[in-house]
Amino acid sequence: MAPRRILGVFAHPDDEVFCVGGTMATYVDAGAEAMIVSATRGEAGQIRDAASATRATLGEARERELRAACRRLGVQEVRLLDHVDGTLAGLDQEAFIEEVGAVIDEFGPDVVVTFGDDGFYGHPDHVTIGVVVTAACARRPDIRLFHSHFPRTRLLLLERLAEWLVELQGRFEGPADFARVFSLFAMETSAVGYADDHIEVAWFPPGMAIIEQGEQADTLYLILAGEVEVAQDQPDGSRTIIRRQGPGEFFGELGVAHQEARTAHVISTEAVTCLVFSRRPATPWAGRGATSARPGLVDGTDEVDPASGATAVIDVRPVIDRKMAALAAHRTQYPIDPDMFPRWLLEAMMGHEWFVQAQPRLEPATDLFA
């Protein structure tokens, strides 16, 4: 029997990891043949690691990264279509459909995966490649087509991180580059829907009480730059300095983990920049202090909204290390060290991949007892 074949067709290098990376690794391990096609080299993308590329070399660098990521996933074939990043919507659509169709015919997949109509978050290149691949598959009705799907999650990083920090023996102190790497990871993964936190970078001037003892806890902080002192007010009116903290250290976890009032002040001793995790954006009228109203808690489980509309879910937790290694291969976009992150966090955020079956289309049931 010929091995099963799965084809992923996307717009840019790194799309493949988020959309189908773990699924590819899972099926390759089971004996399938896999191929990734990228319509562009991603030369219009950001450069998040200046040492990895320049604007002139970014396209070449991202092609190398795509091939390295696919090797880590076990994907046997990689193809780039040589279109310019950001221009897919302006191409002759019929010619584009024919071009993609020729690749499909050459590889002969049983399953094809691409973006859905929303292009994940509306990116014109994502939308276009999804439309084109869907049209090409419609002319080949024997193919099973799935759209990559990113359902809304209820997982909150601030709650899971707070619980982890409280359970540690001693205070957490990350490696020298932890603050930069983790802030990038947190903001990117929340942007793609792996977590439901509101995350922002905030600056605090010297001498500001970032946290006040006794106020309700709804935020977690990671220091990116500067130093703070943690202090407690005593019954006699004096104040005791407990410790000082700097870049790469968290604060605020006790109140979040125990769902109780803050046990100490955190005061900036110099200008401080923090990555702030919140359940929701702060309102201009939000009060402070022990009498402030406690915000309603949000379910912090890692369950997906049951109304997400997905028709298939692949458990990729067994291959999460390879998925993260593939993501790290895209260093111009994600200069991360996967070993910095606890495995439970990666499994909770990125351990499942979701899809909507687009072909053959699933028809609604007409008999509830059938």
Image (cartoon, grey):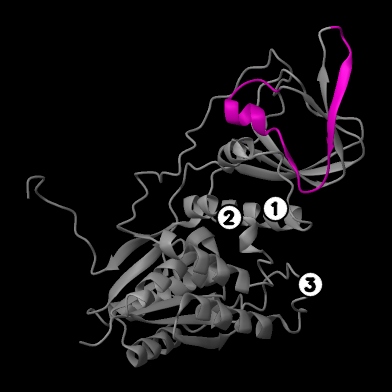
First of labels 2, 3 by sequence position: 3
Whether pointer 2 and pointer 3 mark residues with C-beta atoms closer than 8 Å, the reply is no
Residue 24 appears in which quarter of the rendering? bottom left
- Give neighbour class at mark 2: few <14, some 14-19, many 20+ (Cα, 10 Å): some
**Residue 342 as seen in the image, left or right of residue 290:** left
User: In which quadrant is the N terminus drawn?
Assistant: bottom left
Total numbered labels: 3
**Residue 84 as seen in the image, left or right of residue 227:** left
Residue 272 appears in which quarter of the rendering? top right
**Residue 158 as seen in the image, left or right of residue 126:** right
In this orientation, does residue 84 appear? no
Q: Name the residue under label 2.
A: 189
| 233 vs 99, nearest the viewer | 233
Q: Where is residue 344 in the image (x, y as percent from the top left)?
A: 51, 50
Numbered range of the magenta stretch: 236-262
Q: Is residue 147 magenta?
A: no
Q: Name the residue under label 1.
A: 183
Q: Mark 3 points at which residue?
A: 50
Q: Which residue is drawn at 62% across and 30% down?
A: 256
Residue type beneath disc 3: Ala
Separation of disc 3 and disc 1 at Cα?
A: 17 Å
Residue type beneath disc 1: Ser
Residue type beneath disc 2: Thr
